[in-house]
Image: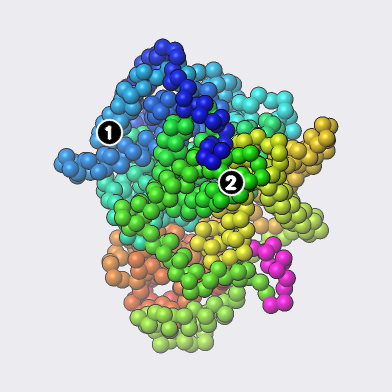
Amino acid sequence: MIVGDVGHSARSTDWAPRHAAAPVRGGIGSLTAALALIAVLMPLQRWWTAQILLVPLLLSVPGVILLRALRIPGTVVSSFPVYVPCASIVVIFGSGLAVDTIGPVLGVAEPLRTVPLLVGLEIICLVLLGTSVNAGPDVAIGWQPVMRFSRYTWTLVVPLVAAAGALRLNSNHSNAVALSAVGLFVLLLIVTTVFSSRFDEALLRMALYASSVALSWSYSLRGESVYGFDISTEYQKLNETILTGVWHASHVNDAYGAMLSVTVMPAELHALSGVSGLLILKVIYPMIFAFFPVALFDLARKVLSPSWAFVAAVFVITQFAFTEIASVARQEIALLLFIAIIAVINENGLRRRTQYILITLLALAMALSHYSTTYVAITVIGLTLPFQWIASWFRDIPRISGAVVVAFTSALAGAVIWYVPVTHSDSHLLQVAQTVQAQGLNLLPNRAPGSSIISAYLQGNTEKPISATQYQHQIYHYYQFNKPNIIPLASAKSARYALHDSAEPKPTVRWPLAHAALDLGLLLIEQLANVLAAVGGLFMVLRRKTSPQARQIGLIALGTTLLLTLIRFSGTLAGAYGQERAQLQGLVLLAITLCWIMQGLAERRGRSHPYVFKVTIACLVLVACNTSYLVNAVLGGGVSANLANSGQAYEYFDISASEIAAAQWLGNVFRPGQLAYADEYGQLPLVAETGIQNGLTLDLTPLTLNQSAWVYASRTNVIDGRAFALFNSLFATYAFPIGFLDENYDLVYTNGSSEVFHR
């Protein structure tokens, strides 16, 4: 066979009768009633009870309607429930973009408001319902699965405790509740893993969802503003969209504002549900992304037993990269769409035309959500095509899979069209291309002279520390040659203003030996998992008795392995795409191949070997305790912001009310063409609350401060007297130059813990 689809028998689905049974119209009545309920609740959206109802309705009803219009069988949806929120995202994208485009033509200056968006959503949903009038009985989605899930809502206690712990830390209380939440998080995952073979799969899904929400909320709910780096800019773009009530397509050199996942979609959710933009990013988006491990479990179930599919999902949740995704709203949406694309590629119960249409819609929505996720998806899916062609000479599989071709071309076309002629936001990719042309791939940039390639590979492309003196010397010479327009004060060269190191206090490690042993164990687990995942993918492709779905997953996993290895070696690609976040996307496939080979080891030669599963559980315990910082809470050492009001993550990402007030004050007096300075700590409140980006400089040193600049000092700068800088994959922590500022600049704003200087 030259062309075909893995998981489809030749021609059987295309030539089968469409529907032998009479249409089912009852579903249309209930969906019409749901649309009416959304309209009825809209005037009540100022009440939190109405908001609690509106959010799930908006994230489910449009998706169910779209899936029905596409004639997706109810059994397919029940086996992969995440199709529903993904389809709802597609409808929200489409309705919001349509209203934003057509509204101004009809004289509506601010189309992204409640009434226009409600009308647009209702019309599109009703049109889709109309096209599904003749749908057969197979599209009906039964309520029985929903009732099964409702029996296990007790698992949601864990995220509620996590939310309470984060809010108590925000109020400067102890971390007792937060620590309890971490304990419940680990306990829920491990106990459910141990007894996964006995539990209902609905409970396994609920445990994954509750754990994911708990872990995400423990970070996203920290601080008075959004928590994280990328999400600060995303929040500013969302606020801008909400305030103006319109989204413009042209976003030259603005890859954030060009993404509908942080502009049109959350603005529409805000307008239709009444939930504030801040809570959408801090609360609702983590709840949407929590479906990701659930989707991974359902995808893994196509080739794994329930127990090993659950292990695959737990392994992903316990990665450090999983905790970081809550700070990148665009990728939260894009990753969910990506895993849905992989699931549709491997879906047995769809007609080929329906499969292609659904893949196209999901791929286009992914391209409109996040550029990096789309680039990785294009690469790994594109690599699958030659890998499958090569494998077809050794195994009885099609030369080309039509579903893979559609996924690749749809994602590529969507990216090219959206990023170039529509939004003009392709500067990120152009910068990467220019960097590669100028510097090459910059292989293993952290490799020290005389060190081995293996040690450099294990270290990864991480940022390296340098002293304050080295940073001052390098940044000063960089400014002399590259920013001659910056004119510092003559007194800045005085030796008394030289930078000095000021590292954050290191918590005492109570049991150093246990800590060192744990670090070694975690390194071994990580590298062994990488090797087994790669080997598992290869065996999935070459093993004779592999199912078509397993072989397809293995083929995509091989492309993923190749890309992640290249990113691990290349400093250029790691800086462009984010090594950890690319790895999380890759784990959609690699977690399955890892558990596939582990399942094979546990059941080799027709005999059960329970010790394999027991060792796996022990490894998961170590990884989960480390990721949640439960280990450091017990053994000593630094913990993250999920457990403490100290440490680098807290200083960097937790934004206080005083910092917001100072940032807003500066935003009101700052004028275009002026320069504003802040260190890495201080930039986030400015970006999130004011949008001061043009003219914002992050090299806050006496020798790089322009004479007439504004200087923003964060809580860490003022209270702890510490500043943080990044430069060329190097970082420095130094004493904030308060003496220089006091003697040469005017203190124009202060609230006790955050200040603004000007001259």
Q: Quick check: is 453 in the magenta stretch?
A: yes
Q: Residues within 10 Å of mark 2 (few under 14, many from 20)?
A: many
Q: Secondary structure at mark 2?
A: helix
Residue 646, x across and y down, in percent: 59, 57
Residue type at the position of mark 1: Gly
User: Farthest residue in the left direction?
Assistant: 107
Query: Which residue is depicted at the point 34% across and 38% down?
Result: 94
Up the image or down, 516 lies above or below 153; here it is below
Helix, strand or loop at label 1? It is helix
Region of the chain picked out in magenta, as a range? 449-460
Residue, disc 1:
120
The answer to whether residue 356 of the structure is visible from this angle is yes
Q: Report the side of 424 relative to 103 (left or right).
A: right
Q: Nearer the viewer, residue 748 or 726?
A: 726
- Residue type at mark 2 is Gln
Q: What residue is shown with label 2? A: 388
Residue at x 15%, y 41% (from the top left corner): 107
